[in-house]
Image: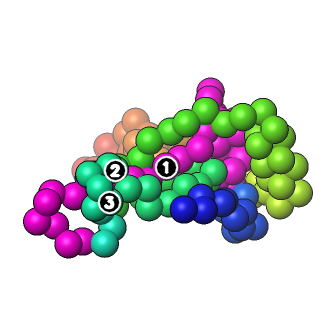
Amino acid sequence: PDWSVQLFRDEAEGYHLNLTSPQPSWFVWWTPAAAPECDDPRHAPEGLPSIQAVTLSYNEAARWMDAGETIEIAPLPAAVANWLAEFAALHYKPEPRKRRRPQSFLAPGERDVSGGNAPPAEGGGDDPPACCL
């Protein structure tokens, strides 16, 4: 079989993630050997595992794993990594970080810098002030 790999612009982030991982790899989706009574065409009839697809995209491999498929990795040769890096550099544009708007409805001391809701200030909350009791 021909296990050629086609690159797609919309997978450029997945290629970038693969290249920046500790070990850039081929991702190989395979199915186990067929039992003698199995007539599923995805299984190799001769008792060997059957390769379904090969990708260089980290994201595509993750989708396969999320679907419960068996994925193996193989080290990526330097020549293929260089070719993939050229493609990723041309097509991968990281999304700019979005500026988080300040919580303008809170006083600066009450704003939660971690992004969650700030606890009420001391003396705040639903209890009326002591002067109004």
Residue 50, position as x, y percentages in the image: 38, 56
> Residue pushed farthest top?
22
Residue designated by label 3: 44
Look at the numbered discs 1 and 2 and tell me whether their residues touch, using CB distance below 8 Å.
no
Residue shown at the point (31%, 43%) measured from the top left: 130
Residue designated by label 1: 28
- Residue sitting nearer the eye, 78 or 114: 78
Position of residue 55 in the picture relative to residue 66 (left or right): right
Residue 76 figure quarter: top right
Q: Does the magenta run of residues contain 20?
A: yes
Q: Does the magenta run of residues contain 33?
A: yes
Residue shown at the point (76%, 40%) measured from the top left: 81
User: How far apart, in angstroms, are the residues tagged by discs 3 and 1?
Assistant: 15 Å
* Kind of element beneath mark 1: strand
Look at the numbered discs 2 and 3 and tell me whether their residues touch, using CB distance below 8 Å.
yes
Q: Which disc, if any, is residue 49?
A: 2
Position of residue 4 in the picture relative to residue 133 (left or right): right
The magenta stretch is 13-40
Lower sequence index among marks 3 and 1: 1
Q: Quadrant of the image for the N terminus?
A: bottom right
* Kind of element beneath mark 2: loop
Q: Nearer the viewer, mark 1 or mark 2?
A: 2
Q: Which disc, if any, is residue 81?
A: none
Residue 106, position as x, y percentages in the image: 57, 52
Q: Label 3 amino acid?
A: Ala
Residue 119 figure quarter: top left
Residue 66, position as x, y percentages in the image: 36, 56
